[in-house]
Image (cartoon, rainbow, N blue to C red):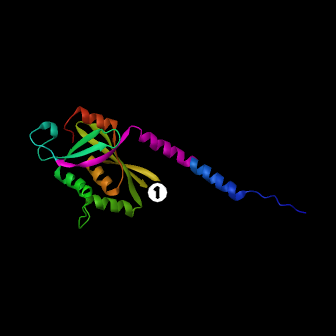
Amino acid sequence: MNKQRRFPAPRLAITLASLLTGLLLVPWTVVRAEQLKDLYEMEVLGVAAAPGGDPSFGQAGQTAVLLRSKEAKRELTLFVGPFEAQSIAVPLQRMKPLRPLTHDLTLSLLAAFRSHLGRVIISDFKDNTYYATLYIETDGKEITVDSRPSDAIALALRAGAPIYASSKALNGASANRSPR
């Protein structure tokens, strides 16, 4: 009698594929967790006209974008111009313009190239100015793009992407009352 030895090839192949997949994903997960360690997820509370005459509230004619961290309740106020404020107010008010605005067009272009906005980070505060970074996911990779915080917020609100602020940006805001 010729006994065939059964080798559990399908089970072994599945196990090996799972292990390899896990090993490939671990470094990315660790890097991403490390990147998010010093960050606070923010929510946009709204936009409001900055009171004129008081230099601690920005220049006359500017608008304040109010953000607050979801857990630590840290606040961040950005002063932007009226056009930037409108770009943020449109998705906050769930308005649908008849034709795509610039931020809508940007997201359409990303989608056309099979990419999407993963998150935005308000990363720094230098010389009385905030800096932000867009994290765009494409072809299994993540690329970063420098951005003004107002544009990053307008895109994130439209895309449903999370908005983060670094401790450095939040601490810079505390030290100076009229950042841009």
Task: Pick the quarter of the image with the N terminus.
Answer: bottom right
Estimate the x, y position of residue 5 in percent, counting from the top left.
81, 58
**Magenta highlight range:** 23-48
Estimate the x, y position of residue 155 in percent, counting from the top left.
30, 54
Residue 3 in the figure: left or right of residue 127: right
Task: Tell me what residue is drawn at x 65 percent, y 52 percent.
Answer: 15
Estimate the x, y position of residue 134 in percent, counting from the top left.
35, 49
- Which element type, helix, strand or loop, lies under badge 1? loop
Q: Quadrant of residue 138?
A: bottom left
Tell me which amino acid carries mark 1.
Asp
* Residue with the most extreme top position: 175
Q: Is residue 29 magenta?
A: yes
Q: Residues within 10 Å of mark 1 (few under 14, many from 20)?
A: few
* Residue with the most extreme left position: 53
**Can you see residue 148?**
no
Task: Tell me what residue is drawn at x 45 percent, y 39 percent.
Answer: 34
Estimate the x, y position of residue 141 in percent, counting from the top left.
46, 52
Task: Tell me what residue is drawn at x 31 percent, y 59 percent.
Answer: 106
Q: Which residue is mark 1?
A: 139
**Can you see residue 76?**
yes
Q: Quadrant of residue 10?
A: bottom right
